[in-house]
Image: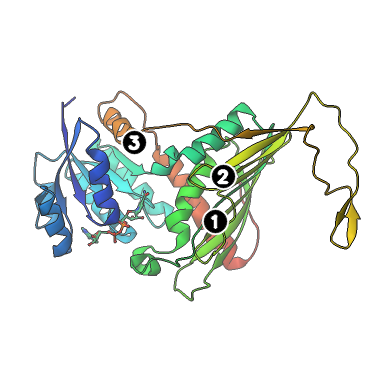
């Protein structure tokens, strides 16, 4: 049934839980009414913010005024908490990575189907502007047919000093940032994956990966490199896209970058050799100014509340989920394949 206002409780009121609280303030039909966290200090903060605090998860689940439970705890308890909430008749929004393996997600989805409740994963980076611009480039063929894409995030702070460093909590950068970048990548093409190779890094001697690089080949010929680093004092571009008619770079979340395409009005001229190091080269001579067109990156704006609005429409039966669970599952299968490829140091040939 349609309600004028849905009541949501945040479970796990840390960095992300409190950020959800702020974002949801912009959605009139959704209200954060309460918080549950296992740490007293976090509960105090929630109380100061005017939220009702619950002493136990059972208290949240037995409160009939609660429509939606949002899970923003460390990754290891997402499954258990999601299933409990669904069984209690709540709709559930769960943070990414939804679970630490693909089988666990299927267990949750089964319970969602049995109970008829909506279960959605917060893959918020589906609405990142840099990604939407790249997706539009694929669709509009701005640089012709894209044959290679590179997607990276790089920091120099190591892994934050919390549960993200620990395996038992589902730590590591592949599950943390990797899940976002791989989710975005799979939305760029309808093609199946054909092969995967990968290396994990443990530069900082942590028990989990502090970064990774993966090479993925799709059946339609598209190749991709996805990289996450936490010891990069100088960054490579966030996106690098090569097409048959041009190349695009987006440097960072500030959307600096450019699109350079072949000027089809100008006849192709044979390049002249340039001095390069101790040699000469024609092959690597840059194209002339007249033979290329440079365009700035055009922004595409989306309000950050879109995720929640879609979730409410799914509850009301008036929209499909913007983050289908099958797509989230495929990303987890890809993550498992990356772990396997890195461990065996081999290319995994598998169609999915
Ligand atoms: P955090 O450590 O800042 O917060 C986690 C909170 O959960 C803490 O307050 C902790 O006390 C509480 N908690 C732990 N176990 C609990 C339990 N069993 N029941 C109730 N509360 C419990 O971590 P974070 O950075 O907020 O990350 C939380 C989740 O959000 C993770 O899954 C993370 O991957 C995800 N996240 C998503 C994004 C995004 O952009 N989508 C960004 C950051 C984090």
Q: Is residue 299 left or right of residue 296?
A: left
Q: Determine whether the residue tagged by mark 1 lies in a helix, strand or loop.
A: helix
Density class for disc 3 (Cα within 10 Å; few <14, some 14-19, many ≥20) is many
If you read the primary sequence from the N terminus, does the residue marked by circle 2 or circle 1 appear first? 1
Q: Is residue 147 left or right of residue 30?
A: right
Q: Position of residue 113 (x, y in %)?
A: 30, 38
Residue at the disc numbered 2: 352
Q: Determine whether the residue tagged by mark 3 lies in a helix, strand or loop.
A: helix
Q: Quadrant of residue 148?
A: top right
If you read the primary sequence from the N terminus, does the residue marked by circle 2 or circle 3 appear first? 3
Q: Determine whether the residue tagged by mark 2 lies in a helix, strand or loop.
A: loop
Instruction: Tell me the distance, in whole angstroms, between the alpha carbons under discs 3 and 1.
Output: 28 Å
Tag shown at residue 337: 1
The number of numbered badges drawn on the structure is: 3
Q: Quadrant of residue 36?
A: bottom left
Tag shown at residue 307: 3
Residue drawn 80% across and 44% down?
A: 286
Quadrant in which the N terminus is drawn: top left
Is 278 or 59 nearer to us in this picture? 278
Is 175 or 228 nearer to us in this picture? 228
Residue drawn 83% across and 47% down?
A: 285
Residue drawn 20% across and 47% down?
A: 85
Q: Quadrant of ligand 1?
A: bottom left
Q: Is residue 34 left or right of residue 236?
A: left
If you read the primary sequence from the N terminus, does the residue marked by circle 3 or circle 1 appear first? 3
Q: Quadrant of residue 4?
A: top left
Q: Position of residue 346 (x, y in %)?
A: 65, 63
Ligand 1 neighbours mark 1 (CB distance < 8 Å): no
Instruction: Tell me the distance, in whole angstroms, between the alpha carbons under discs 2 and 1.
Output: 10 Å
- Kindly report which numbered mark, 2 or 3, lies closer to the viewer in this rendering: 3
């Amino acid at each position: 049934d349609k309600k004028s206002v849905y009541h949501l409780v945040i479970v796990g009121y840390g960095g992300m839980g409190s950020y959800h609280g702020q974002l949801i303030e912009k959605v009139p039909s959704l209200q954060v009414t309460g918080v549950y966290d296992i740490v007293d200090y976090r509960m105090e903060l929630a109380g100061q913010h005017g939220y009702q605090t619950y002493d136990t998860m059972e208290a949240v689940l037995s409160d009939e005024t609660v429509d939606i439970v949002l899970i923003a705890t460390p990754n290891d308890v997402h499954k258990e908490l999601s299933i409990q909430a669904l069984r209690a008749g709540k709709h559930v929004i769960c943070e990414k990575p939804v679970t630490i393996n693909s089988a666990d997600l299927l267990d949750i989805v089964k319970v969602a189907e049995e109970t008829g409740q909506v279960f959605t994963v917060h893959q918020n980076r589906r609405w990142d502007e840099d990604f939407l611009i790249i997706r539009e480039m694929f669709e509009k063929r701005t640089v012709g047919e894209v044959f290679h894409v590179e997607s990276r995030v790089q920091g120099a702070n190591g892994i934050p000093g919390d549960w993200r460093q620990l395996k038992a909590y589902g730590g590591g950068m592949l599950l943390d940032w990797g899940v976002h970048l791989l989710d975005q990548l799979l939305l760029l093409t309808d093609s199946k994956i054909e092969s995967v190779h990968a290396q994990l890094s443990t530069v900082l001697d942590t028990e989990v990966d502090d970064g990774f690089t993966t090479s993925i080949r799709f059946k339609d010929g598209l190749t991709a490199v996805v990289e996450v680093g936490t010891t990069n004092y100088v960054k490579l571009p966030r996106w690098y896209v090569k097409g048959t008619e041009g190349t695009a770079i987006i440097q960072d979340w500030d959307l600096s970058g450019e699109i350079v395409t072949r000027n089809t009005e100008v006849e192709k001229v044979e390049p002249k050799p340039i001095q390069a190091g101790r040699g000469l080269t024609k092959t690597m001579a840059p194209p002339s100014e007249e033979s290329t067109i440079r365009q700035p990156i055009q922004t595409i704006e989306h309000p950050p509340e879109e995720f929640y609005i879609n979730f409410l429409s799914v509850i009301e039966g008036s929209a499909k989920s913007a983050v289908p669970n099958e797509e989230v599952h495929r990303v987890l299968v890809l993550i498992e394949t990356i772990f396997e490829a890195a461990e065996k140091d081999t290319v995994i040939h598998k169609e999915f």
